[in-house]
């Protein structure tokens, strides 16, 4: 760490930025992918005009729900952390 | 020395700056959602306005650090603050007229540095602080945001490659709107605090508050209101440049860009790095163009923005210095009032100029033809 660049903050911003800024959307994408699994979309697969995303597989839907919930929980936790650090007197 | 008339004028000018800050930066959060049609334009600016209001209450970490460490606070008088704000407002409005997303934070910092230099000389500026806290983060933050957005974009398309284009667009719309909301919240948290910091500085300079005081509640509420109203007014010109001009955006790219922006802004704010939300949002949008094979980044548009970024600090500083010199030459309360009358005249002129080529919620998404103003005049549709 030198006086011009705060490298300690910088690497944290890059690493946590990638985890939250790319990792959480990726988890959301995994949810969309598992949601699309199942018999409904296999028959509709040829129809590229369809914008249906639910494939009808129960396991797929449950996995998708878990993914979406993790994303929501992570956002909620992040906002709470920012509130905590931004109001030091509330500790 | 206290002067309540000047103090009131400074507070009003600061809230005016806060309004232009919201207005200029609606695009940072909502440009991609408007461009992909995930949200109707007027709903988008309303949601963003509300979340900016909420965001302003979320954290107070940045408000405490702004201005401290950049200029010698003993050199800061009410007139210096007023002149600095004038520099920031004029630069914000000029870049809005040109549809360029430039940093409101840099405009404010530049204005204050210029007016401080005019009042107390170059030695009153903490140059090391300026480089390490403002210039270097301005160079690094768009690169980091672009990296995160490019990785995110590549991963999103990779994971959902078996979905049809229509299904992917449908699925990611929800994610895109949610991530854009996070950016609005982050913007309120990050940017409203800068005006809170400036008003607090003015209250301290006037002797109304003791040094080292925190922002009083009425300051927080007024700043939150001003930035959220500004956001709701919507800087359609900048929205158009960011959403249509820089990269043609699909909804997965929108989600990747907004998630990257939200994460980088919120993380930096919580580490006490006060960076520009505009630089981050622009970096993210370029990154999402780089992360998708076949997507085109219009480097000419990006270059125009980068040029404006380089000129933001010195230009706002020159206006700030001029305003300070004029106010000083006239002297006292009258000097500040003359400055503000000139400011109002310039604001009026810029607004009048903007009417000649309207960009609003009706034509914001028209095909990009190389300029902010759509080829077909909006008046034809009105």
Image: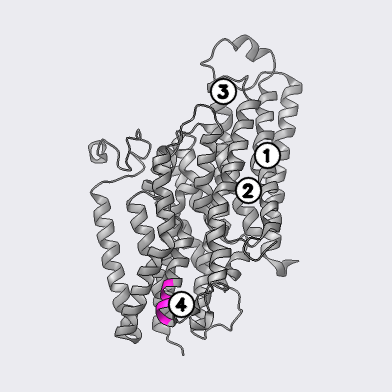
Question: What residue is disc 4 on?
Answer: B122
- For the residues labelled 1 and 2, the Cα–Cα distance comes to 10 Å
- Residue B306 or residue B251, whichever sits in front: B306
Question: What residue is disc 2 on?
Answer: B263
Q: Which residues are magenta?
A: B114-119
B232 displayed left or right of A77: left
As helix, strand or loop, the secondary structure at mark 2 comes to: helix
Q: Residues within 10 Å of mark 1 (few under 14, many from 20)?
A: many
Q: Residues within 10 Å of mark 3 (few under 14, many from 20)?
A: many
Residue placed at 53% from the left, 75% from the top? B200
Q: Position of residue B228 (x, y in %)?
A: 48, 57
Q: Residues within 10 Å of mark 2 (few under 14, many from 20)?
A: many
Whether the residues at callouts 1 and 4 have beta carbons within 8 Å, the answer is: no
Seen in the picture, residue B92 relative to A68 is either above or below; the reply is below
Question: What residue is disc 1 on?
Answer: A24
Q: Position of residue B143 (x, y in %)?
A: 56, 47
Seen in the picture, residue A43 relative to B330 is either above or below; the reply is above
- For the residues labelled 1 and 3, the Cα–Cα distance comes to 20 Å
* Marked residue nearer the N-terminal end (4 or 2): 4
* Residue B116 among those drawn in magenta: yes
* Marked residue nearer the N-terminal end (2 or 3): 3
User: Subunit of mark 3?
Assistant: B
* Marked residue nearer the N-terminal end (4 or 3): 4
Of badges 1 and 4, nearer the viewer stands 4
User: Subunit of mark 1?
Assistant: A
Q: Position of residue B367 (x, y in %)?
A: 35, 33
User: Subunit of mark 2?
Assistant: B
Residue placed at 62% from the left, 9% from the top? A43
- For the residues labelled 4 and 3, the Cα–Cα distance comes to 58 Å
Seen in the picture, residue B366 relative to A75 is either above or below; the reply is above
User: Subunit of mark 4?
Assistant: B
């Amino acid at each position: 760490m030198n006086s011009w660049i705060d490298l300690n903050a910088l690497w944290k911003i890059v690493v946590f930025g990638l985890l939250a800024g790319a990792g959480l959307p990726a988890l959301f994408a995994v949810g969309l992918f598992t949601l699309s699994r199942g018999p409904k979309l296999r028959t509709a697969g040829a129809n590229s005009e369809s914008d249906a995303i639910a494939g009808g597989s129960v396991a797929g839907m449950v996995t998708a729900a878990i993914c979406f919930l993790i994303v929501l929980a992570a956002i909620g936790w992040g906002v709470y952390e920012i509130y905590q650090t931004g109001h030091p007197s509330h500790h | 020395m206290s002067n309540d008339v000047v103090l009131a004028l400074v507070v009003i000018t600061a809230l005016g700056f806060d309004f232009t800050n919201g207005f200029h930066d609606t695009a940072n959060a909502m440009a991609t959602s408007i461009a992909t049609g995930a949200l109707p334009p007027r709903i988008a600016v309303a949601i963003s306005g509300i979340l900016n209001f909420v965001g302003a209450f979320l954290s107070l970490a940045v408000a405490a650090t702004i201005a401290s460490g950049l200029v010698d606070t003993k050199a800061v008088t009410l007139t210096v603050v007023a002149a600095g704000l004038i520099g920031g407002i004029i630069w914000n409005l000029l870049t809005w007229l040109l549809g360029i997303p430039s940093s409101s934070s840099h405009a404010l910092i530049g204005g204050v540095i210029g007016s401080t230099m005019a009042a107390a000389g170059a030695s009153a500026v903490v140059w090391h602080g300026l480089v390490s806290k403002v210039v270097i983060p301005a160079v690094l933050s768009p690169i980091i945001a672009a990296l995160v957005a490019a990785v995110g974009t590549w991963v999103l398309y990779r994971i959902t490659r078996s979905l049809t284009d229509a299904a992917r667009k449908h699925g990611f719309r929800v994610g895109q709107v949610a991530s854009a909301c996070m950016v609005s919240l982050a913007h309120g948290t990050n940017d409203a605090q800068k005006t809170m910091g400036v008003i607090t500085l003015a209250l301290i300079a006037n002797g109304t508050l003791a040094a080292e005081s925190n922002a009083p509640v009425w300051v927080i509420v007024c700043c939150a209101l001003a930035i959220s109203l500004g956001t709701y007014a919507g800087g359609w010109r900048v929205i158009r440049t960011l959403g249509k001009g820089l990269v043609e955006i699909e909804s997965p790219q929108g989600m990747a860009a907004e998630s990257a922006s939200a994460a980088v802004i919120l993380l930096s704010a919580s580490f006490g790095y006060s960076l520009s939300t505009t630089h981050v949002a622009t970096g993210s949008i370029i990154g999402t163009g780089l992360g998708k094979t076949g997507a085109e980044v219009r480097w000419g548009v990006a270059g125009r923005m980068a040029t404006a970024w380089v000129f933001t600090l010195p230009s706002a500083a020159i206006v700030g210095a001029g305003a300070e010199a004029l106010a000083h030459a006239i002297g006292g309360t009258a000097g500040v009032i003359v400055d503000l009358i000139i400011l109002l005249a310039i604001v009026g002129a810029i607004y009048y100029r903007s009417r000649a080529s309207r960009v609003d919620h009706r034509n914001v998404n028209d095909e990009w033809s190389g300029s902010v103003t759509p080829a077909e005049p909006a008046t034809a549709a009105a």
